[in-house]
Amino acid sequence: MTEQDRIPALSFDRLSAGRDSFSNAYLIARSTVSPIHLPIIKAGICLSLAILSASVLPLYITFFSGFVMPVIAVSFFVLLSLFFAIVWPGIIKGRGAKIFDSNQMLSLPFSASFFKSFFEIENEKETIREYWTEIDRSLETKNMFIILGGRQRPLVLIEKKHLSDEQQNTLSSFLEKVLIFKHKKAK
Amino acid sequence: MEQKRVTVNYLITKDDLYQFALAAIKDRSDKAERWCCRLAGLLTVVFGLVGAVFLAAAAYQRVVYLLIVFAGLAVGLYYDTLHPYLMRKQVNAYVNGAKCCSELLFFYETEMQFALENYKAVIPYRMLYQVVETERLYIIKIGLDQIKYVPKRAVTPEDCAFINRCFKAQLKEKFKREGVR
């Protein structure tokens, strides 16, 4: 490691993460693994299957002289679609909240230092170093930066409310530079 | 820190990772779920055998019933044979792809210290989420998303007794022992 690598390119103090923002970040992280994980996509698939089931209703009546099975299928897929659209996000957020509650380190105030080849999170009890090569991806939303896939801390959350506008822009362009295609700006 | 301390220094091996993966899955999965799986497998096997012996009228029907028997065996033995096998394959793939580094931990009477390459921490036991002791390792859960493990092969029996005493005193019901004599 050269001397230059030991000097942080960016450093932020007095950061913290709340339970609600952590559970929101967890939901965003889960939803962006792939499009299929988005609640709206899951609900859409189920709705399409419901429409498909409804479309075979005339054919079914012709051949089997009954309509019970297609109606059951349509009702099932419609209910499943509502489940994914309305209930599912709450369940995922609940899992995030459970993780936050289980780990007392997550609620401690921390500082974050960003280096050329890694970043460090430091709180009262622990110092975590994660190398950029091991990071899965990072997301920037309206309210937060989320760094995912670290070996020690799978989800690192930095809320924008703790950063000035200039710091937000600097961090955003730094993440774009170090993670290149792994950094995404979510709406 | 003037307390008695136990030092644990070890290099992670393939077998450690495998044992950890098995213990973690056993810890995470529900006992009822495992028994339901075994029962469902047994019922499917019985159904398949009854069908093959008494119900099959043609050869192709017998083949279908025998396939049901095999499916039942796969379901019933999933947790005991198929899952550990798949897990070992995954661990092998992980070990071949990632580096396994040495780990250094210190156990004190009221807190523990991690001195790993990427993780340095001094955590009081009371801040841990849970500790599970199995026959071969300790699973230390800092939180549900942050789990460490210590193979017992790296700890002497006397040190094991000290660590257990500390965990029992500090963690109380958060310290669990599974399959330990």
Image (cartoon, coloured by chain):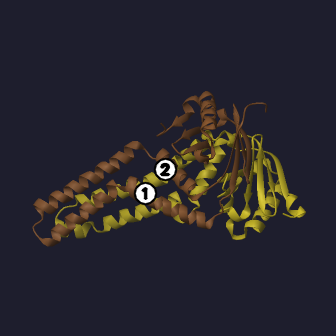
Chain colours: A yellow, B brown
B37 left or right of B48 in image: right
Residue behind mark 2: B25
What is the quadrant of residue A31 in the picture?
A: bottom right
Identify the residue at horizontal 25%, vertical 55% (top origin): B44
| Residue B140 appears in the figure | yes
> What amino acid does circle 1 point to?
His
Q: Chain of mark 1?
A: B
Do the residues under discs 2 and 1 have CB atoms within 8 angstroms?
yes
Identify the residue at horizontal 72%, vertical 35% (top origin): B5
> What amino acid does circle 2 point to?
Ile
B179 left or right of A120 in image: left
| Residue A34 appears in the figure | no
Identify the residue at horizontal 43%, vertical 57% (top origin): B83
Residue behind mark 1: B83
Identify the residue at horizontal 77%, vertical 40% (top origin): A124
The verdict on a common chain for dots 2 and 1 is yes
Q: Which mark is residue B61?
A: none
Classify mark 2: residues with Cα within 10 Å, few (<14), some (14-19) or many (20+). some
Percent x, y of residue B98: 63, 64
Tag 2's secondary structure?
Answer: helix
Work out whether A157 lies above or below A54: above
Q: Nearer the viewer, residue B82 or B145?
A: B82
Q: Nearer the viewer, residue B50 or A185?
A: B50
